[in-house]
Image (spheres, helix red, strand yellow):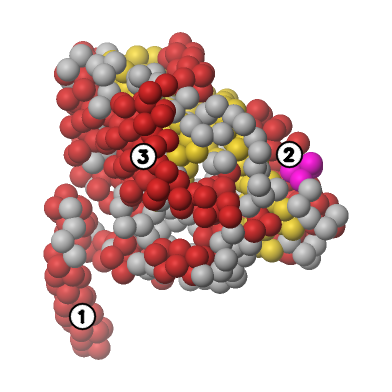
Amino acid sequence: MDIIDSLLWVFGIVFTISAVLVSIVIFLENRDPSKTIAWLLLFVLFPLGGFIIYLLCGQNIRKKKIFKTQKIFSEIKATRLFKSLKEFENLILVEKQAIMENLIFNDLNMDNKKRVINLLLNTGRAPFTLNNKVQILTNGEQKFNQLLKDLKNAKHHIHIEYYIIKECEIGNKIKDILIQKSKEGIKVRVLYDDVGCWRLWFRRSFFNEMRNANIEIYPFLPSYFPFFNRKVNYRNHRKIAVIDGNIGYTGGINIGDEYLGKNKKFGFWRDTHMKIEGESVYMLQLTFLLDWYFASKKRVFDEKYFPSISYKGDSIVQIVASGPDSDWEAIHQAYFAAISQAKKRIYIQTPYFIPDESILMALKTAALSGIDVRIIFPGIADHKIVYLASLSYFEDILKSGGKVYLYKKGFIHSKVLLIDDDIASVGTANMDLRSFMINFEINGFIYDKKVIKRLEKDFIQDIKDSEEIKLVEYLNRPIIQKIKESAARLFSPIL
């Protein structure tokens, strides 16, 4: 017993010293006070568990820089970054003002968009491109029908980057096509998030079959020891597909059968993805190649992956990537700027709603000002604690005059923001702190009335498939439900 008591005593001393040191580190990192309090509360309620979770998920890698984006851009420029990307650089540095003035002259509402466009130019290295065709895809069937067709028709290369890839019916279909295209001499690269694809840790044959067909495959931030890896919290949530450098896909749909409505719990899966043809594909390609460089340490910034695009479309698009490596929270800041300048309506679709104080204040202020603020949110939880925390924020929206709807047709996973008739955002970023500050995300900001009208039409249909939360009913929900939501919200800054 004396030995056991001594060991417990030593463990207690070591743990106490470690906890004190971690607490000091948290304070010295100058975090958002709400995050600091949430971490300290976790230590108090769950001393050992909280300590371990912090070591795994709490360290501020943004300051430490997982990789230096500026350094990588410098290396790209040093490799004869051909004419196409040079034109993009000129667009940012030289031509943007003249083009902007011309657009404002032809579009009376363009001045309303200028703030967001300039913000993304400065924070996200996101040139706005003029010649694009954007096709909105509202579920997995639409997305995969298009994607499979384009993969089969690939002539030069295929680049795939997904948070989740599953060995399932659709996963195997895509795998088989990629293997066939590789055998035909098409260059195929696959980048996957190691934690998002955790199910494949135990089914290595899925990726090995592709590797055996000369397909290059790399994990993003691999977690060889997932329970002892300080980077496990920083995940690549992007969904990108680029075919031949002139067709691109991004949005909310990963590779899995549930996105085709084949999961009994969720049923019909409502999501929003988009297929892009035109100049903005360059930025999807560049984002993929930067992520590929980071994961594989292989430089493939080659002119052949950026073919000359003669496509003449009429959609103005900015593709913006953000993550813990970024100097600025580009998507987060763009959301705030867009919401703050809304004049008529703000429509939001998100599967998780954990806004920071700035976004919440902007939404409340807009609703109190008479702007039509509406949020469509799932009626089914896929992550219980996050779902409960999200529900707790709706009181502020409802009391301010906003409207909240619970989607009842199935599960809604769309990440869409609509501002008036002027600005739309479709991508991978949820309306939550994880997407704003922790994950690697990518969104398309669209300034095209036809695309915005299409998204608005989809939004109105989704309202018909939803049930509105009334303020009176919300305030009268069971006390145990309120307690659960409040408890979950305490930890929302670190969810």
Residue type at tag 3: Gln
Q: Position of residue 397 (x, y in %)?
A: 23, 24
Q: Which amino acid type is shown beneath numbered disc 2?
A: Asp
- The earlier-in-sequence mark between 2 and 3 is 3
The magenta segment is 150-154
Task: Pinpoint residue 18: horizontal percent, then vertical percent.
Answer: 20, 75
Q: Which residue is mark 3?
A: 97
* Badge 2 vs badge 3, beta-carbon distance below 8 Å: no
Closer to viewer: mark 2 or mark 1: 2
Magenta part mainly helix, strand or loop? helix
SS at mark 3 in the image:
helix
What residue type is disc 1 on? Val
Q: Residues within 10 Å of mark 2 (few under 14, many from 20)?
A: some
Q: Which residue is mark 2?
A: 150
The correct choice, above or below, for 171 with respect to 371 in the image is below
Element type where label 1 sits in the image: helix
Q: Is residue 58 above or below residue 441?
A: below
